Image: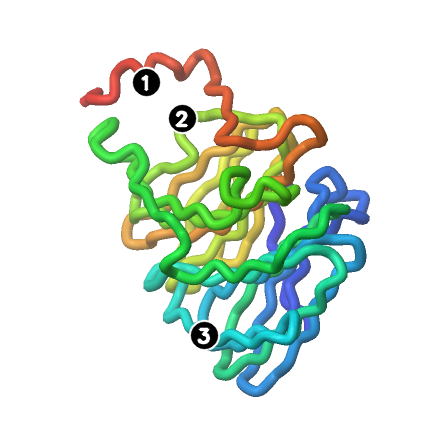
Amino acid sequence: MFRYPKFRNGRQQLTNAYSESTAFTMMNIAAYDLKAGEDLMILEPGMETAILLLSGKITYYYDETEATAERAGVLKALPTCLHVARGHEVVVRAETDAEILVQSTENERDFPSRLFRQEDVVKVVSCEGKWENTAVRDVVDIINIKNSPYSNMVLGEVYARQGRWWSYIPHFHPQPEVYYYKFERPEGFGACFIGDKAYTVKDKSVGAFPGGLTHVQVTAPGYPMYCAWMIRHLPGDPWDNTRTDKPEYMWLNENPELK
C-alpha cells in the first residue's frame, strides 16, 4: 500500500488497474520526467484521462487544439490539467524539461475535453487555527463531482506546510485513494499512517489506500510536502467530500482551540 517506485526510461508507474497488487485502486497512474523537445503520446483505451503538469513548460495537443502551460514547481504555482474522455489521443510536448502526472480510469461516458488552467482551480486553506495550527494546509480542487459529474475520478492537490499534519483527524471513506508525494529538496521526508502502520514518505513516493482504511500524514520541519490526491468513485457511491472520522478522535472536532 506504500511504494517507492523507480523511474524507468523517464516513467514511474504508480498504480495499475490491471495489476494484482494495485487493482483495488481501479486507476492507472504514472509520472513522467520529460526532456526538452520530447513528445509523449497518451491514449488509455476505454479510459478517461487527466494529465497534470507538475513542473516545466509543455504544450498539449488534443482535439485539433494546442495549448501551452507552464509551472515553476508544485509548491510555487497552481496546476494546469487536461481532462479528456476515452478515445481522445493527447500528445504532450516538453518545451523545457518537465514533469507530468497521468491519471486514468474506465469510463464509458463521452464528454467534452476540458483544460483546467490555473485560474480555473480553487485553493482553500483547511484547518486554519485548529489545534495551534498543527494541521493547517492548502487544498486545491481540480476535478471533482461538482465540476465534472460525468467523471469517474477526483483529482486535487495538497500543499502541507512544514512540520504540519494533514488528512487529519484520522478518517476513512469507502472509495480507494492514491497519493503522490513530492518535496522541493530530495532529502525531504515525512510519515504516512495507513491504518495502524507507519511508512516513511520520501520524494516521489506513493501511498495507495483501499477503502475503509484511515490515512493521515505529517511532514518534517523545514520540508513542506506536496501531494497529488486521486480518488476513484465507486459505482453508485461517488466521493463527494465523503469521510467518516474515527470515533475515538471525534473529541478533537469539539475542541479546535486545544492547547
Instruction: Name the residue carrying label 2.
Output: 169
Position of residue 197 in the picture relative to residue 220 (left or right): right
Residue 245 spot, x, y in % from top left: 46, 20
- Mark 3–mark 1 Cα distance, whole angstroms, equals 40 Å
Front-lying residue, 21 or 86: 86
Report the front residue among 10 and 78.
78
Residue 76 visible in rendering: yes
**C-alpha gap between disc 1 and disc 2:** 8 Å
For marks 2 and 3, the one nearer the N-term is 3
The residue that disc 3 covers is 56
Give the residue displayed 62% in from the left and 56% down from the top: 112
Q: Give the residue displayed 49% in from the left and 25% down from the top.
A: 171
Task: Name the colour scheme.
Answer: rainbow
Q: CA distance from mark 2 to mark 3?
A: 34 Å
Disc nearest the viewer among 3 and 1? 3
Q: Nearer the viewer, residue 259 or 150?
A: 150
Give yes or no for contact between labels 1 and 2 (Cβ–Cβ under 8 Å).
Answer: yes
Name the residue tied to disc 1.
Answer: 252
User: What percent of the width, then of the height, locates residue 191?
Assistant: 45, 42
Label 2: state its secondary structure. loop
Q: Is residue 207 left or right of residue 164?
A: right
Question: How busy is the neighbourhood of tag 2: few (under 14 within 10 Å), some, or many (20 plus)?
Answer: some
